[in-house]
Amino acid sequence: MDLEIARKALETGIKFVANSGLKVEELRRGYVRCRMPFDGNGNHIGTMYAGSLFTLAEIPGGALFLSSFDATRFYPIVKELDLRFLKPAKTDVTVEITLDDIHAASLAAEAAQKGKAEFILEGQLKTADGTVVAESRGVYQIRSLQPPPK
């Protein structure tokens, strides 16, 4: 998939995400960096809203799918996402997630053969000064658009 089209789809394809102002700052095969702006995402005590942090933690799974897998053969789902809040965030927050080519190729082969493949993505959500405000662990799946061979 054209990565510029993917970036735009990630930022605007879901109205909730578009309203949050989330930006995909960098997207390439196996790598994504996203930013959630503090402006517009504050809560009643002056820190970033938990739902905004959750959104920032979840979107990279879709981004890595679009940059690493063939969307004409597979589609992604999120099965589980855990977010451990460590410190309050009072500034923009970023997350960087990677998926190496060897693992992606193995997942694609498994999904083609079995109809689906599961993988885990972990990340640290950080403020501009590098403070880790949350840690994420997402369980994702790619599923084949074609039935597995019998």
Image (cartoon, grey):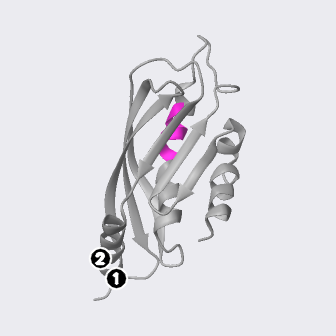
Return the disc, 2 or 1, that comes first in the chain's sequence: 2
Task: Please tell me whether residue 54 belongs to the stretch shown in magenta.
Answer: yes
Q: Which residue is mark 1?
A: 148
Secondary structure state at the residue bearing disc 1? loop
Tell me the residue at 59%/10% (across/down): 45
- Image-based side of 101 in relation to 92, left or right: left
Q: Which residues are magenta?
A: 53-59
Q: Residue furthest top?
A: 45
Number of marks in the rendered image: 2
Q: Kindly indicate whether the residue at mark 1 contacts the one at mark 2 (C-beta within 8 angstroms).
A: yes
At label 1, the amino acid type is: Pro
Near-viewer residue (128 or 87)? 128
Residue 141 percent across, percent down from the top left: 38, 61
In percent of width and height, residue 91 lies at: 59, 22
**The C terminus: image quadrant:** bottom left
Residue 105 x %, y %: 34, 72
Q: Which mark is residue 68?
A: none
Left or right of 4: which side holds 58? left
The quadrant of the image that shows the N terminus is bottom right
Residue drawn at x 64%, y 40% is 22
Task: Give the main secondary structure, helix, strand or loop, of the magenta stretch.
Answer: helix
Give the label on residue 114, or none. Answer: 2
Identified at 70% across, 51% down, the residue is: 12
Cα separation, mark 2 vs mark 1, equals 5 Å
Residue 87 position within the rendered picture, expressed as x and y whole percent measured from the top left? 43, 18
Q: Between 85 and 98, which is closer to the camera in this rendering?
A: 98
Secondary structure under tag 2 reads: helix
Type of amino acid under label 2: Lys
